[in-house]
Amino acid sequence: MQTINEVILFKATPHVVFELLMNEEKHAKLTDSKSKISKKVDGSFSIYNGSLFGKTLELKKDKKIVQLWQCKMQGWPHDHFSKVTFEFEKTAKGTKMIFTQENIPDKCYESIKAGWHEYYWNPIKNMLK
């Protein structure tokens, strides 16, 4: 199992970035896919037309999101969850997001790491231009 640790800078407030991840309408627009997201602790989510899903463990509005994620992809065990943490800090130019994903199956690590950039970080940056 492997872990991703990254710091990503966005030119927007923590609230705007938080909402792109937790508001199902905004998330659907960002990902151009179906999204169902509960904004409650222990609430579930299903994104990318159901290929990624899980539940929220901790939620501090505009500050922190902690979730368990499961992924429908080759090499990802059917009953396995990965812990994902997004932490948001306001900066002079926007938001510093500290991202951690723990317990990623070795076979999926490279694909998952690249996927965050391709399907989240870059689209969020493009949307905020």
Image (tube, rainbow, N blue to C red):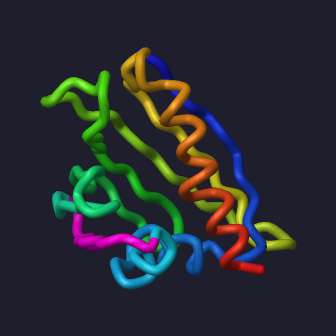
Residue 56, picture quadrant: bottom left
Q: Quick one: 10 or 118, which is closer to the camera?
A: 118
The quarter in which the N terminus is drawn is top left
Compared across the picture, whether 73 is left or right of 84 comes to left
**Which residue does the image show at 25% across and 40% down from the upper left?**
72
Compared across the picture, whether 89 is left or right of 41 comes to right
Q: Quick one: 45 or 66, which is closer to the camera?
A: 45
In the image as oriented, which residue stretches furthest toward the right?
92
Q: Quick one: 38 or 79, which is closer to the camera?
A: 79
Could you tell me what secondary structure mostly forms the magenta stretch? loop
Q: Position of residue 12 (x, y in %)?
A: 71, 77
Residue 48, picture quadrant: bottom left
| Residues shaded magenta | 32-41
> Where 83 sits versus 76, above or below?
below
Residue 100 within the segment the image draws in magenta: no
> Where 27 sits versus 109, above or below?
below
The quarter in which the C terminus is drawn is bottom right
Residue 33 within the segment the image draws in magenta: yes
**Which residue does the image show at 72% across and 58% down from the upper left?**
96
Q: Position of residue 42 (x, y in %)?
A: 17, 58
Q: Quick one: 102 or 47, which is closer to the camera?
A: 47
Q: Position of residue 119 (x, y in %)?
A: 54, 56
**Which residue does the image show at 28% across and 73% down from the upper left?**
39
> Where 98 sits versus 125, above or below?
above
